[in-house]
Amino acid sequence: MTTHLVSLGDFNKSELQAYIDRALELKKEAKDGVRHQQLAGRTIGMIFEKPSTRTRVSFESAMYNLGGQVIYLSSKDTQLSRGEPLKDMARVMSRYVDGLVVRTFGQHVVEELSAYATVPVINALTDLFHPCQILSDIMTVIEAKDKPLEDLHIVWIGDGNNMANTWVQAAAKLGFKLTLACPEGYDPDAEILKNAQNGAVKPIAVVRDPKEAVRDADVINCDVWASMGQESEAKERLAIFRPYQVNGELMACGKADMTVLHCLPAHRDEEVTDEVLEGPQCVAFDQAENKMHIHMAILEKHLL
Ligand code: CP
Ligand code: NVA
């Protein structure tokens, strides 16, 4: 059966853990010089309707590292931009490639593609979710901390965006404490939050005060204040989110060994100061590397 990865909500704890375990193993193998060929002769199509540096290049590298090949299609390159129905695109692409990696605006786009595609569809970011990113971020947390994930308090600071929604799902599935400090009106998606809180073993809470949120945090996580597609709101958001900047003052309210995550790209001196991003507690570049290892694990699992 074709298994898609459009939302972490479709997977159970052991399935999510398996991606991370395999990525940790592949990372170790890469350092030991092990070469892979398990996807030789297979091809993925990458349909990207938003810009990307990390996700695009790490998926392409992941596929080549497994012996496979990639066809990259930006939105202007396909007939989607001229209104070809998604259901036709899905069925046509399924005749040519062994999997689709899709970055787009609406979550409904990846859902409709996955409903019609006969090959796996992998969500490489929508306005609602960024599932592959959160898997590599959790892998990075596991590497950075010497406590089990279930014993960690992870904090999100800033916009209740696609990243935040996916952290909410991950907290419920993997069973860790999550606090989100968001300004009023910028909470994560209400339905995703309610569903996660109903099934969670550890608290998942939204607070307004970032200093209160970081007090016993093991990990804090930040992201841009205006996501792709929200450029027209950027100026207004600058003022609203200013109290949510991850800076020296906020760091001083947390534990001395608090780890800082940022999925990048970062806007220095907006959501995070240069001092914190370049500081010893920040693991943003490990996160960026781990995207390639997790994408290898995802491609192996869904394409083999
Ligand atoms: N973190 C992330 O998804 O980065 P890109 O937008 O560069 O892919
Ligand atoms: N929330 C950001 C994440 C970028 C990787 C965006 O959607 O633009």
Image (tube, grey):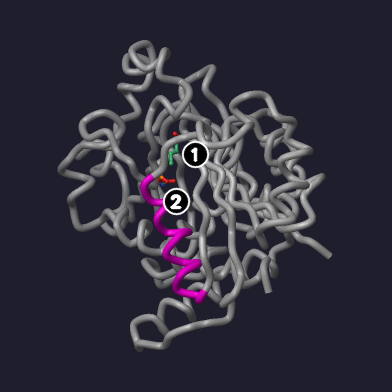
Return the residue nearer the eye: 92 or 158.
Answer: 92
Question: Does ligand 1 reach within 8 Å of label 2's beta carbon?
Answer: yes
Identify whether 292 is placed above or below 231.
below
Q: Is residue 54 above or below residue 208?
A: below
Query: What residue did someone put label 1 on?
Result: 74
Numbered range of the magenta stretch: 53-67
Q: Is residue 112 left or right of residue 268?
A: right
Please state if 243 lies on the left or on the right of 188 as rendered. Answer: left
Q: Looking at the rendered structure, which numbered label has been put on residue 206?
A: none
* Residue 273 location (% of width, % of height): 21, 37
Task: Give coordinates of residue 129: x percent, y percent.
Answer: 59, 40
First in sequence, mark 2 or 1: give its number.
2
Is residue 56 toward the left or the right of residue 94 in the image?
left
Q: Quadrant of the N terminus?
A: bottom right
Q: Say which residue appears at 68% left-offset and 54% top-offset.
A: 5
Picture residue at 50% right of the left edge, 72% below the top: 23
- Is 75 drawn above or below residue 92 in the view shown? above
Rendering quarter of residue 236: top left
What residue does disc 2 label?
Answer: 55
Q: Residue at x 39, y 37 (%)?
A: 223
Tell us which disc is closer to us: 2 or 1: 1
